[in-house]
Image (cartoon, rainbow, N blue to C red):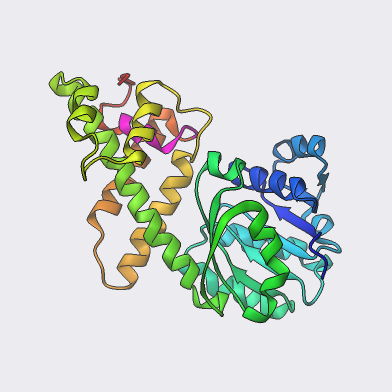
Amino acid sequence: MTDKLTVSVLGTGIMGAAMARNLLRAGHTVRAWNRTRAKAEPLAADGAQVAGTPAEAVEGADVVLTMLHDGPVTLDVMREAAPALRSGTAWAQAGTAGVEALGDLAAFAREHGLVFFDAPVLGTREPAEAGRLLVIAAGPGGHRSAVSPVFDAVGARTVWTGEDGAAGTATRLKLVANSWVLAATAATGEVLALAKALGVDPQGFFDAIEGGPLDMGYLRAKSKLILEDRLTPAQFAVATAVKDARLIVRAGEEHGVRLDVAAASAARLERAAAQGHADEDMAAAYFASFDTGDRPQA
């Protein structure tokens, strides 16, 4: 197989659009589709073929890359694409679909003769645009050469977790990583909210922890977005973070683990969304520390 592929990208939101552009820069042919076509249209200027339907997008594709909201949405879109899918085509499911949904996705792949890769990515807008995502993948070793050029184009590194995408090893690792991201985001917002309430200059806090084990690049990056009111465009939106948080809590419950911090993070994000911050960066969970309508600045 040539290293230059025809890749169908289904879902061109924040992450999918960035991944499509990096595939184009790597020399691949990209057919892009999004339910809201206006989100896919800008990719035409970069050389992508914008399709009107999922079936049109996947016709003749070597690899189908889905970057959609969740498992049920992904399955619905792939069902729309089904008439044009070729047996033997590689399908890389790159969204955070959740453990529950993988069985249905893998069953669809088997039904249509697709080679299924569970391949969620870790990262936000900036690393996606730079092609520096971490790809967490599981899939048959004998077919990895079919998707490696795609993963190399969108990511800085690929971590393989197993031979069977249906087993969910990649998605499970992604949920564990996201649980840390969400906890750190919630803690960042609460630190700044408490500092505001107590009249503490946040810079004093940053100076106190600088260079020590409590210092953290992620804390500083998310704090900067809040303090400088740069929550749009979102690196990772509040509404999407709510979905991920709920998937994490559900996964814990199904395996007998109570995840109090993840549940509280989900509740904070939901309050922030209700206050009007759904499309802002997930750091906007900061506003959930205050009464609805206050919309205080850090």
In the picture, residue 106 is in which quadrant?
bottom right
The foreground one among 127 and 176 is 127
Which residue is at 85% across, 62% downward?
59
Residue 4's quadrant in the figure? bottom right
What predominant SS class does the magenta segment belong to?
Answer: helix
Q: Nearer the viewer, residue 51 or 134?
A: 134
Q: Position of residue 205 (x, y in %)?
A: 19, 28
- Residue extending farthest to the left is 198
Residue 278 seen anywhere in this rendered image of the structure: yes
Q: Is residue 282 magenta?
A: yes
The residue positioned 56% from the left and 74% from the top of the image is: 165
Q: Position of residue 70 (x, y in %)?
A: 54, 57
Residue 120, relative to residue 130: is it above or below? below
In the image, taking residue 39 as reference, residue 100 lies left or right, namely: left
**Quadrant (top left/top right/bottom left/bottom right) for the C terminus:** top left
Front residue of 263 and 24: 24
State the residue at coordinates (21%, 41%).
Answer: 212
Q: Quadrant of the N terminus?
A: bottom right
Q: Is residue 207 above or below residue 149?
A: above
Q: Residue at x 33, y 41 (%)?
A: 185
229 within the magenta span: no
Segment colored magenta = 279-287
> Furthest-front residue in view?
211
Query: Residue 187 location in percent, x, y?
Result: 26, 41
